[in-house]
Amino acid sequence: MHVVMIFLDGVGMGEPDPSVNPLFSARLPVMRRLMGGMPSLHDRNLESSGGVVLPLDATLGVPGLPQSGTGQASLLAGINGPRRAGHHFGPHPPSSLHAAIERKNIFRRVMETGKSACFANAFPQGFFDYAAVHPRRLSMTTLSCRMSGLALMREQDLRDGRGVSADLTGEGWKKMGSPAIPVVSPQESGRCLAGLAARHHFTLFEYWKTDFAGHSRNMAESAAVLECLDAMLEGLMDGEGAAHRLLVLSSDHGNIEDLSVKTHTRNPVPLLLHGRHHRAAAARVLAHSRPGLHHVAPVIVEMLAGG
């Protein structure tokens, strides 16, 4: 069994209003097919021929607006980040959570079961220069890799087809001083991600452009970011290894689903489980009376350990 997890920053369930919610104005045929529609505050539980969508609580019983640092710690380490920290915090995890993240991050826990793990995003040299100076201010994903001894992908990995660009096309690398990085289609990035997932038991890809687009409150930009993601999913589903793969797609907090506000939202976030053993995974999540962000990582580890 193989699990590929796509972490979307800032995507919640909102009103099904295309004037404020780009999830209902953008052309997203693949997401609609995988999800059996588009989840909203009025249609939170969906089912398709191969998957299910469940709502996850992103507030986790803590007042205030959910933030990336504690939300991602919850999603990717299986801990109630804001409860442990005492408040919602972002953009990076607070230092008070570092010890728990080091022990419980999903990369470490997967590898402790004897299975292989991969973080698909490739990073420019500028990131490594920054990380050397600010090692405590890393995002949840990069901090988890460093703490678990998992090497991050670099520019050469992207050139060789072993990594995926965070923007899914490679266009952004020119602005970062790497004009030689080839521009590819999102579908090609999806097929690359499928190849990585076929060679590892657990593969994570992070797509942060959704949160940036949500903060912009620009409908055209937000729709374009989502349509790029949809095209990547097309390539992923057409790529190798689909029969042996469980796709897990979720987020850390709401944002892009409501462009009428500039801030994050308190809305639930969707959890898509699609493919191999998706019903068993859904049953484990639903065993909790109020499924939240912190219930996802333990289920993934349990599914891999048993498979």
Image (cartoon, grey):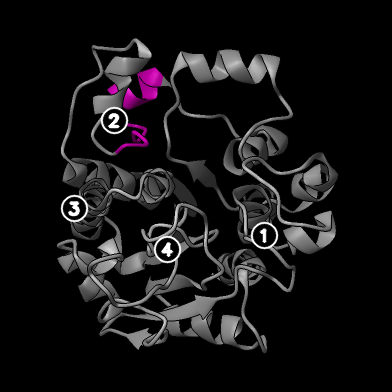
Q: Which mark is residue 288?
A: none
Marks 3/1 in contact by CB < 8 Å: the verdict is: no
Q: Tell me where residue 284 sits by quadrant.
A: bottom right
Q: Which of labels 2 and 3 is toward the front?
A: 3
Helix, strand or loop at label 4? It is: strand
Q: Position of residue 223 (x, y in %)?
A: 22, 54
Which of marks 4 and 2 precedes in the sequence?
Answer: 2
Q: How many marks?
A: 4
Boundaries of the magenta span: 155-167
Q: Nearer the viewer, residue 282 or 86?
A: 86
User: Where, by quadrant of the figure, is residue 149 drawn?
Assistant: top right
Residue that lies at the very extreme toward the front in this rendered image: 260
Image height of 73 relative to 300, above or below? above
Q: Amino acid at mark 2?
A: Gly
Q: Quadrant of the N terminus?
A: bottom left
- How many angstroms separate mark 3 from mark 1 (CA)? 28 Å
Q: Tell me the kind of residue under disc 1.
A: Ser
Where does the image place residue 93, in percent across and percent down from the top left?
70, 44
Residue found 56% across the figure and 68% down from its top:
266
Q: Name the residue rendered at 79%, 42% in the picture.
A: 98
